[in-house]
């Protein structure tokens, strides 16, 4: 009996950690959304700096270009350079440079505001679902390891959920298409990062939680299913 109790206790601890991680990601998302957008003037200054380093006018700069242009040590530049080299090709393009140089306390302008809202909805639903599951599991197991008398309210059957309208369904798919830049049917963490919609930490979190079969991104099906769950809707013919 005690072995079963300890196993359940360990499971609760793990669930609590997952809930805390999910809520932290949601809070970080909400905090980032409230940051002021970097002004056009400041963005132009950063673009000028990039052009000054891009001596060949190639649209890319190297680690050496940045080290020389910023006038700081190569080791300092390298750690940041590698993080923002989203294509992992040893080069930084203009958009990657702007992301890298955006000052703390500001965010870059949205290029896909609807995408930010959609991904935020998935984050919020994920946090609520984990918290609800933890509460349900705790309520059904008292300190003696017995089933409690509390009856948990079950979720609405999918067949009774309202049908998502065509416009919303189309908008969700468009967001996915915009994120899936290589059109392979999977939105990877690097693609999420390059969208400039979310912080890198949140991109990493979504990449490992939306699709249970992948830790580095999510498929269209997993993404759409997450949105249906988040909004409490269904889609005929979608399984």
Image (cartoon, rainbow, N blue to C red):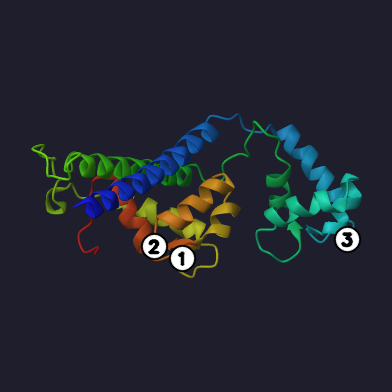
Relative to the observer, which residue lies in front, 8 or 132? 8
Q: Nearer the viewer, residue 179 or 168?
A: 179
Q: Residues within 10 Å of mark 3 (few under 14, many from 20)?
A: few
Residue 175 point in image, percent of width and height: 45, 53
The disc placed on residue 220 is 2
Of mark 3 and mark 1, the one earlier in the sequence is 3
Q: Residue 121's x, y, as percent?
A: 38, 42
Residue on which disc 1 sits: 186
Q: Residue at x 36, y 45 (%)?
A: 13
Q: Which mark is residue 67?
A: none
Q: What residue is at 87 percent from the left and 55 percent from the top?
A: 65
Along the line of sight, the residue nearer the viewer: 145 or 59 = 145
Which residue is pictured at 80% across the width and 38% down the height? 45
Based on the displayed image, in which of its 4 quarters is residue 153 positioned?
top left
Task: Kindly report the distance in space between the C-alpha atoms of the residues bearing marks 3 and 1.
Answer: 34 Å
Q: Which residue is mark 3?
A: 56
- Contact between labelled residues 1 and 3, with CB atoms less than 8 Å apart: no
Q: Earlier in the sequence, mark 2 or mark 3?
A: 3
Q: How many marks?
A: 3
**Badge 2 density bin: few <14, some 14–19, many ≥20, Cα 10 Å:** some
Q: Helix, strand, or loop for circle 2?
A: helix
Residues at marks 2 and 1, CA–CA distance in whole angstroms? 6 Å
Nearer the N terminus, badge 2 or badge 1? 1
| Circle nearer the viewer, 2 or 3 | 2
- Do residues under tags 2 and 3 come within 8 Å of each other at their CB atoms? no
At numbered mark 3, what does the secondary structure look like: helix, strand or loop?
loop
Query: Left or right: where does residue 238 sit relative to residue 110?
Result: left
- Looking at this view, name the residue that lies furthest to the front: 2
- Up the image or down, 24 lies above or below 9; here it is above
Left or right of 103 in this view: 36: left
Asked if marks 2 and 1 touch (Cβ < 8 Å), the reply is: yes
Q: Residues within 10 Å of mark 1 (few under 14, many from 20)?
A: many
């Amino acid at each position: 009996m005690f072995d079963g109790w300890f196993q359940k206790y360990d499971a609760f601890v793990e669930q609590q950690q997952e809930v805390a991680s999910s809520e932290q990601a949601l809070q970080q998302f909400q905090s980032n959304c409230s940051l002021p957008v970097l002004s056009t003037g400041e963005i132009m200054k950063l673009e000028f700096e990039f052009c000054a380093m891009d001596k060949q006018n190639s649209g890319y700069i190297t680690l050496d270009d940045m080290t020389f242009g910023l006038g700081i040590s190569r080791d300092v530049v390298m750690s940041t350079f590698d993080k923002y080299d989203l294509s992992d090709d040893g080069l930084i393009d203009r958009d990657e440079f702007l992301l890298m140089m955006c000052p703390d306390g500001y965010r870059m302008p949205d290029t896909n505001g609807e995408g930010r809202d959609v991904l935020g909805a998935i984050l919020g639903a994920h946090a609520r679902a984990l918290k609800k599951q933890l509460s349900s599991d705790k309520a059904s197991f008292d300190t003696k390891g017995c089933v409690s008398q509390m009856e948990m309210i079950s979720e609405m059957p999918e067949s009774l959920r309202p049908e998502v309208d065509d416009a919303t369904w189309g908008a969700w798919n468009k967001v996915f298409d915009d994120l899936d830049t290589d059109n392979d049917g999977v939105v990877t963490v690097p693609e999420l990062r390059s969208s400039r919609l979310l912080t890198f930490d949140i991109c990493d979190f979504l990449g490992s939680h939306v699709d249970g079969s992948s830790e580095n991104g999510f498929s269209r099906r997993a993404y759409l299913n997450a949105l249906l769950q988040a909004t409490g809707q269904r889609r005929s013919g979608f399984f």
